[in-house]
Image: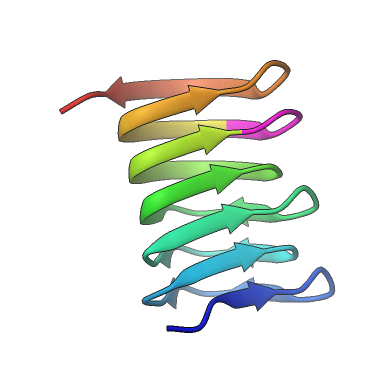
Amino acid sequence: MTDSRISSDVTIDGDIKGTSTITVDGTVNGNIHSEGVIIAAEGNVKGNVSAKKFVNEGSIDGKVSAEDAELKVGSSNKVAIRTKTLSVEPSALLSGKIKCGN
């Protein structure tokens, strides 16, 4: 499997499905379903994310379903999140609902 990257000059209006890790440096207006999803510091997602591993360093507005979720320093998270494990770093903005555990 090869990881995929959506560069900072790209905007995608529509859903994305993959089998590896997708890193978003640009903007996605739609849902993402993949093994792993990383929203980089300049990345922006407006839609739902479904992944085994989710990492946000940028901005998301939507629902997240992941086995493992990490909300990094400076990230903006307007989410309804369902995850087995959740890590929230200092200064990560979090607004929404959380369901954590089995």
Residue farthest to the right, as pictured:
9
Position of residue 87 measured from the top left corner of the image (x, y, whole percent):
49, 25
The residue sitting at 47% across, 23% down in the picture is 96
The residue sitting at 40% across, 77% down in the picture is 18
Residue farthest to the bottom, as pictured:
1
Residue farthest to the top, as pictured:
90
Position of residue 6 measured from the top left corner of the image (x, y, whole percent):
68, 74
Residue farthest to the left, as pictured:
102
Residue 74 among magenta residues? yes
Asked which quadrant contains residue 84, the reply is: top left
User: Eyeballing the image, is 79 above or below 98?
Assistant: below
What secondary structure is the magenta-colored segment mainly?
loop
> In which quadrant of the rendered image does the C terminus lie?
top left
Closest to the observer: 99 or 88?
Answer: 88
User: Eyeballing the image, is 19 above or below 86?
Assistant: below
Q: Is residue 84 left or right of residue 24?
A: left
Residue range in magenta is 72-77
Residue 92 among magenta residues? no
The residue sitting at 72% across, 28% down in the picture is 73
Q: Is residue 81 left or right of residue 44?
A: left
The residue sitting at 63% across, 53% down in the picture is 39
Asked which quadrant contains residue 76, the reply is: top right
User: What colour scheme has been applied to the protein in the rendered image?
Assistant: rainbow
Q: How many marks?
A: 0
Closest to the observer: 32 or 62?
Answer: 32
Q: Is residue 25 left or right of residue 95?
A: right
Position of residue 89 measured from the top left corner of the image (x, y, whole percent):
63, 22
> In which quadrant of the rendered image does the N terminus lie?
bottom left
